[in-house]
Amino acid sequence: MKDTTISQSVRYVGADDKTIDLFEGQYVVPNGISYNSYVILDEKIAVMDTVDKRASDEWMENVEKVLDGKQPDYLVVTHLEPDHAANIQALAEKYPEMTVVASAKAVSMLPQFFTLDFSHRCQAVKEGDTLSLGSHTLHFVMAPMVHWPEVMVVYESSEKILFSADGFGKFGALDTEEDWTCEARRYFINIVGKYGMQVQALLKKAASLDIQTICPLHGPILKENLGFYLNKYDIWSSYRPEDEGVLVAYASIHGNTAQAAKEMAEILKVKGVEKIEVMDLARDDMSEAVENAFRYSRMVVAAPSYDAWVLPCMDTFLRKLKAKNYQNRRVAVMENGSWAPSAGRCMKELLGEMKNVTVCEPMVTIRSTVKPETVTTMEQLADVLLEK
């Protein structure tokens, strides 16, 4: 279990979920997910967010244990998405004197999720507002569209803690020992990636704060080497490549396009590329393929023609990239077609809708199987792809 100790006054009350198969109904989470929630104990007591309904009972037990018979004065809601907010009404009904503190947008959205009348129970806060709990003071920082419109983060100035909402979160339960970067990157790119500009704005605000601990709503509490995590977020949210390398993403019907993709990877390796990922879009995790497209500086897409378009999994992949604001990359295109190749045209069309994506020429057209002349064109394309 990751260390969830924060301080004597700030306590972790979240829960792991190892039974979930798909996060947000679409992302495979083999190591589960954590739903993080915190309690600040002071003259006034604040509960910082709730958890998903899947962990309601465990969370409520954790909260009651930390409260030890005391009554919370505030429930601070940084994000209203149900994996963090499912128990707002339950806690409000259990503690009728408790005030719900949230952004004005979140307050207006509460009736969409709950039947309880919160109209006399809410305190709407805005940018720069503060709330004193005694020796702890909460500073509210609005973070609209990171990644919902009502989001805010909260800075506690006495212990220098940033309650970062979905920021700096990752897939994986807290009892999982794994590298932070990989699953944090997949989490960020697929869930928050579209909103890079808004994340950049939030990072600028965070730069003015003396942050010593980051408490996200998913994943481990971050206490050391915070510059590492802030730098990763700066790279990801500004759509800069994290690594010099190539993702070779392919779709294949009978294996011929797969063979061509793997041969292209070998050509790139011979030409000195050290980091190459080859992914089968029909079988490998699509969210990981999207993650790797953003991770690397260059990409090769290879797919066969299908119904006068392109094989559906490639279509899905490219549309997901567009939805997440894929940009600032060089891309090589390889198509396969036995009689009327259409995949290249379709992939170029989709790539052409993305910002500052350079489609390299010459495009490789495979007529059913790879021939010596195909390899020659692949080598030429590789040279162009690797140009600075």
Image (cartoon, rainbow, N blue to C red):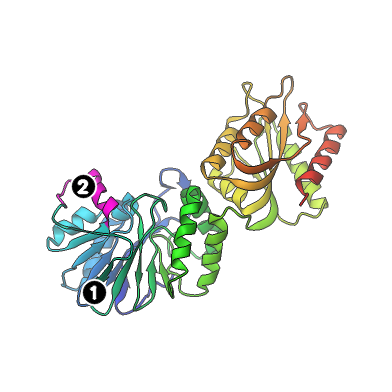
Secondary structure beneath label 2: loop
Q: Position of residue 198 (x, y in %)?
A: 46, 54
The quadrant of the image that shows the N terminus is: bottom left
Does 44 lie within the magenta span?
no
Above or below, 66 relative to 149: below
Q: Residues within 10 Å of mark 1 (few under 14, many from 20)?
A: some
Viewer-proximal residue among 209 and 177? 209
Residue numbers of the magenta segment: 103-118
Determine the main secondary structure of the stretch shown in magenta: helix
Rendered residue at 86%/37% (across/down): 376
Quadrant hosting residue 91 = bottom left
Q: Amino acid at mark 1?
A: Leu
* Label number found at residue 114: 2
Q: Position of residue 130 (x, y in %)?
A: 28, 69
Secondary structure beneath label 1: loop
First in sequence, mark 2 or 1: give its number.
2
Viewer-proximal residue among 128 and 184? 128
Viewer-proximal residue among 202 and 225? 202
Q: CA distance from mark 2 to mark 1?
A: 27 Å
Outermost residue to the top: 339
Q: Is residue 45 visible?
A: yes
* Left-right relation of 18 to 258: left
Q: Is residue 86 visible?
A: no
Residue carrying label 1: 133
Rendered residue at 28%/59% (across/down): 77
Rendered residue at 26%/80% (across/down): 135
Badges 2 and 1: C-beta atoms under 8 Å apart?
no
Q: Nearer the viewer, mark 2 or mark 1?
A: 1
* Label number found at residue 326: none
Rendered residue at 36%/49% (across/down): 149
Above or below, 176 relative to 146: below
